[in-house]
């Protein structure tokens, strides 16, 4: 009830004072014409001294990626506002001291929305408009019932995080609650400026600057190092209603009449939970005795018009929200289907997802169920096995297997269980086969045009399906594959002589190999090397031929580096890297660890403006020439060269620094 009481008070303090006929208004003490308002601490007629505003900016320069603590939100804090100074690729995170993640924990980024934690409801905002420069934010009315820690998931330079919350002071004055009001009902009021001196704010801001220059690394989840130092800034607005209730002194009415309109209670709330509406009841009373009298005693034209007020804003009991069943996991036979079951609670006319323990008093509906759309089809063997594919040895035989539905139609194989499919092909052994030597005819050409050479033929042992040869096979008496031949003496004959081929030019894929081809004269016992033109009447054998080795497989290819983006002060250059197969098509089979870099830094040296030794000022008052903008004329540009050049560089930047 205390949390609902505070939320209701804060909602009403943000509502403008109700305008009444004749320019009159109702103060926070419910008297028409009263000028009392609720201060930022929730005190009717208070002077803003019952609470403190704690705020500051976390602007440490972070170096390591990951979670860094920004600020601690104490127990009992209200009007919490954690906001990035401007948009970045960083994320804000929130968790409790017990270790429970509330927003963006465990390296998982949550969607913007409302999240319950620390006894209050946090609104997580992440502007996603392209044109927007606003950063992320956490907003909560409070009060918190435990200590919370705000973190930044650091990924790029810190843009700064502004934090602000309100805590009650030791001398806090409790807000007024009229006797006829129940805790949790709204009170009309308005915000008033805080009356503390500007000097105090400046002193506190100086303390913050000192804290920011202390250095150190902001702590991560596992560290307990430097932290930010919160600063009280009394020139901000904030609201909070304390526990106790102290009624203020009655405010004298402005009108001279003895009777006036006063609010005496409200109508019944339209709902029992989840934020309903009710209306104030106004009665005519005596100004001094507050005794109710007939309405004719008061001016009917001055009677306030009842306006709607929220009530029973505490959440309704949690309930299980059941989603629709998913499609069955199988088109036939026994399958599974799923549905989402969430614990939800109506809060401020909005249905929010809450922790499952809120629904533990209810039996949780099942999230999975079995399903069967139809009976599956079955396999049928339509033919017997065929004869073996070979007359001897090991061959294969086949049969026809079909998937048939429960009404007898042949359907696709996927309609049946593939694990139960009968074999439609198998091996068959027809016994050992006889073997014999198979020969080709001798080649007609001798291997040498003169002198001794050989003629060849091919010999192979193959299965014989015709003759009844011994089953032991071809045996060891392999017929000869070469026979000698001689085309006569070779004395004085000129011919091309080719050496042996070299190794292939590459280790894999297609390459080339070379050999030496020379013109020789063959004598009885030796060869004589001649000039190539001596053999020009003969066809010269090739000295180069293609060679093909095993496939290379996928490899990384890259282009040349691009030009550096800057000529000085650190730029970068890029190149394109692709994984290509042997046929030069894109592939994904390359080793990712061997991938060449696609981007690298370049030109880290500082930019130095070019200094021209001949470019000097000839007069002492060249600053007058610059101020008069006379550098556009060649005479002054030469006479005051150094001054005019500095001005030109200041407007356009040093050459090469882009």
Image: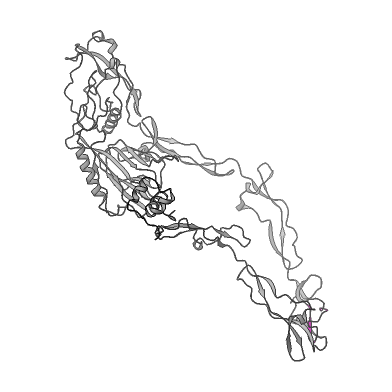
Q: Looking at the picture, tell me which residue is in the foreground, 74 or 181.
A: 74
Give the prevailing secondary structure in the magenta stretch: loop
Q: Is residue 403 left or right of residue 295?
A: right
Q: Looking at the picture, tell me which residue is in the foreground, 228 or 469.
A: 228
Q: Is residue 44 left or right of residue 421?
A: left
- The residue lying furthest to the top in this view is 296
For the N terminus, the image quarter is top left
Q: Is residue 318 left or right of residue 212?
A: right
Residue at 81% across / 89% down in the picture?
489
Is the image coloured rainbow, by chain, by secondary structure, or in one colour? one colour
The residue segment tinted magenta is: 442-457
Q: Quadrant of residue 503?
A: bottom right
Judge whether 317 appears above or below 428 on screen: above
| Number of numbered tags placed on the structure image | 0
Q: Quadrant of residue 628?
A: top left
Residue at 73% across / 90% down in the picture?
526
Q: Looking at the picture, tell me which residue is in the foreground, 445 or 318.
A: 445
Judge whether 489 appears above or below 622 on screen: below
Rendered location of residue 301, percent (x, y) = 29, 11
Q: Is residue 453 magenta?
A: yes
Judge whether 396 appears above or below 515 on screen: above
Q: Is residue 470 visible?
A: no
Rendered location of residue 45, percent (x, y) = 20, 26
Rendered location of residue 201, percent (x, y) = 22, 40
Q: Is residue 55 magenta?
A: no
Residue at 69% across / 74% down in the picture?
544
Rendered location of residue 433, percent (x, y) = 75, 71
Q: Quadrant of residue 291?
A: top left
Q: Is residue 341 visible?
A: yes
């Amino acid at each position: 009830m205390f949390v609902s009481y505070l939320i209701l008070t804060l909602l009403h303090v943000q509502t403008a004072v109700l305008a009444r006929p004749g320019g009159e208004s109702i103060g926070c003490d419910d008297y028409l014409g009263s000028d009392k308002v609720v201060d930022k601490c929730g005190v009717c007629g208070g002077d803003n001294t019952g609470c403190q505003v704690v705020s500051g900016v976390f602007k440490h320069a972070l170096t390591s990626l990951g979670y860094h603590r920004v600020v601690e939100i104490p127990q009992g804090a209200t009007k919490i506002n954690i906001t990035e100074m401007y948009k970045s690729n960083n994320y804000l995170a929130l968790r409790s001291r017990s270790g429970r993640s509330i927003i963006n924990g465990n390296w998982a980024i949550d969607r913007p929305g409302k999240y319950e934690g620390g006894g209050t409801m946090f609104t997580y905002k992440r502007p996603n408009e392209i044109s927007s420069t606003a950063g992320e934010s956490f907003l909560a009315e409070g009060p918190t019932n435990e200590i919370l820690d705000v973190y930044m998931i650091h990924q790029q330079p810190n843009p700064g995080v502004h934090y602000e919350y309100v805590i009650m002071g030791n001398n806090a004055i409790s807000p007024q609650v009229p006797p006829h009001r129940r805790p949790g009902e709204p009170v009309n009021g308005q915000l008033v400026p805080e009356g503390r001196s500007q000097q105090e704010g400046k002193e506190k801001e100086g303390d913050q600057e000192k804290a920011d220059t202390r250095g150190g690394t902001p702590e991560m989840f596992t560290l307990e190092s430097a932290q930010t130092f919160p600063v009280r800034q009394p020139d901000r607005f904030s609201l909070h209603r304390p526990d106790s209730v102290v009624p203020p002194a009655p405010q004298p009415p402005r009108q001279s009449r003895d009777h006036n309109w006063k609010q005496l209670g409200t109508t019944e709330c339209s709902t029992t939970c989840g934020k309903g509406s009710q209306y104030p009841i106004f009665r005519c009373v005596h100004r001094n005795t507050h005794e109710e009298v007939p309405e004719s005693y008061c001016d009917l034209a001055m009677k306030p018009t009842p306006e709607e007020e929220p009530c029973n804003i505490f959440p309704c009991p949690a309930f299980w929200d059941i989603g629709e069943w998913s499609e069955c996991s199988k088109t036939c036979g026994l399958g599974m289907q799923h549905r989402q079951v969430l614990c939800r609670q109506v809060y401020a006319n909005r249905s929010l997802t809450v922790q499952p323990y809120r629904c533990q008093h209810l039996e949780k509906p099942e999230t999975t169920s079995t399903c069967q759309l139809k009976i599956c089809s079955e396999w049928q063997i339509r033919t017997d096995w065929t004869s073996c594919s070979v007359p001897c040895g090991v061959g294969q035989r086949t049969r026809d297997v079909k998937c048939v539905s429960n009404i007898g139609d042949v359907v696709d194989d996927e309609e049946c269980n593939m694990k139960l499919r009968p074999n439609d092909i198998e091996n068959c052994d027809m016994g050992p086969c006889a073997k014999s030597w198979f020969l080709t005819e001798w080649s007609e050409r001798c291997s040498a045009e003169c002198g001794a050479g050989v003629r060849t033929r091919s010999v192979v042992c193959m299965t014989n399906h015709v003759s009844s040869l011994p089953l032991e096979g071809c045996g060891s008496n392999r017929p000869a594959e070469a026979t000698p031949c001689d085309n006569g003496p070779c004395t004085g004959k000129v011919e091309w002589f080719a050496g042996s081929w070299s190794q292939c030019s590459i280790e894999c894929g297609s390459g080339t190999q070379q050999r030496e081809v020379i013109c020789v004269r063959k004598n009885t016992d030796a060869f004589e090397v001649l000039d190539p033109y001596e053999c020009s009447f003969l066809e010269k054998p090739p000295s180069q031929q293609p060679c093909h080795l095993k496939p290379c497989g996928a490899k990384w290819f890259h282009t040349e580096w691009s030009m550096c983006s800057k000529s000085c002060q650190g730029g970068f250059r890029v190149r394109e890297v692709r994984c290509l197969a042997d046929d030069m098509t894109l592939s994904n089979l390359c080793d990712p660890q061997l991938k060449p870099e696609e981007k690298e830094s370049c030109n880290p040296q500082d930019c130095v403006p070019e200094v021209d030794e001949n470019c000097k000022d000839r007069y002492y008052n060249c600053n007058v020439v610059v101020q008069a903008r006379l550098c556009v004329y060649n005479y002054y540009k030469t006479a005051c060269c150094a001054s005019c050049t500095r001005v030109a560089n200041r407007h356009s930047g040093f050459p090469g620094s882009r």
